[in-house]
Amino acid sequence: MSKLIEELKTALAFDHNQILTGELTEEQALKIANDLHQLGRKPTDQEVHEIIKKHYKGEILSSSNESRDQVRTNTLQKTILKMIQSQKK
């Protein structure tokens, strides 16, 4: 699971400019992944930021760039699906 947590942190930074500076626990990561998954679509930077703030108490470095929303990779979505699937095992 620690590999998936690191993948999630990387995807959040790469796709949404949300850099988590502290340790992200497995519980926090799963809650973030579940909330993002429940949106059913690619989230905006603002949505991602709000969901992270809801579950993560550490510092978040972010720079909103909504114009990038149209050219995002699917890294975050793929990582979220992996985390959801790992939960069900």
Image (spheres, grey):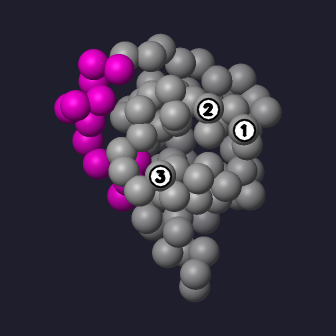
Q: For mark 3, does the 10 Å Cα neighbourhood hold few (<14), some (14 to 19), or many (20 or more) residues?
A: few
Foreground residue among 7 and 57: 57
Rendered location of residue 11, percent (x, y)? 43, 42
Dot 1 amino acid type? Lys
Q: Please give the label number shown on residue 39.
A: 3
Inter-mark Cα distance, 1 to 3: 15 Å
- Check the image and report above or below for 9 versus 57: below
- Report the Cα–Cα distance between label 2 and label 1: 6 Å
Q: Can residue 2 be seen in this view?
A: no
User: Which residue occupies 36% across, 45% down?
Assistant: 42
Dividing the picture into quadrants, the one containing residue 49 is: top right
Q: Where is residue 70 in the image (x, y as percent from the top left)?
A: 22, 31
| Residue 88 belongs to magenta span | no
Is the C-beta separation of discs 1 and 3 under 8 Å?
no
Where are the magenta residues, as a range? 66-79
Left or right: 50 in relation to 64: right
The first of marks 1 and 3 along the sequence is 3
Of the image marks 3 and 2, the number of the one nearer the N terminus: 3
Q: What element carries label 1?
A: helix
Numbered mark located on residue 54 in the image: 1
Question: Element under label 2?
Answer: helix
- Residue wearing tag 2: 50
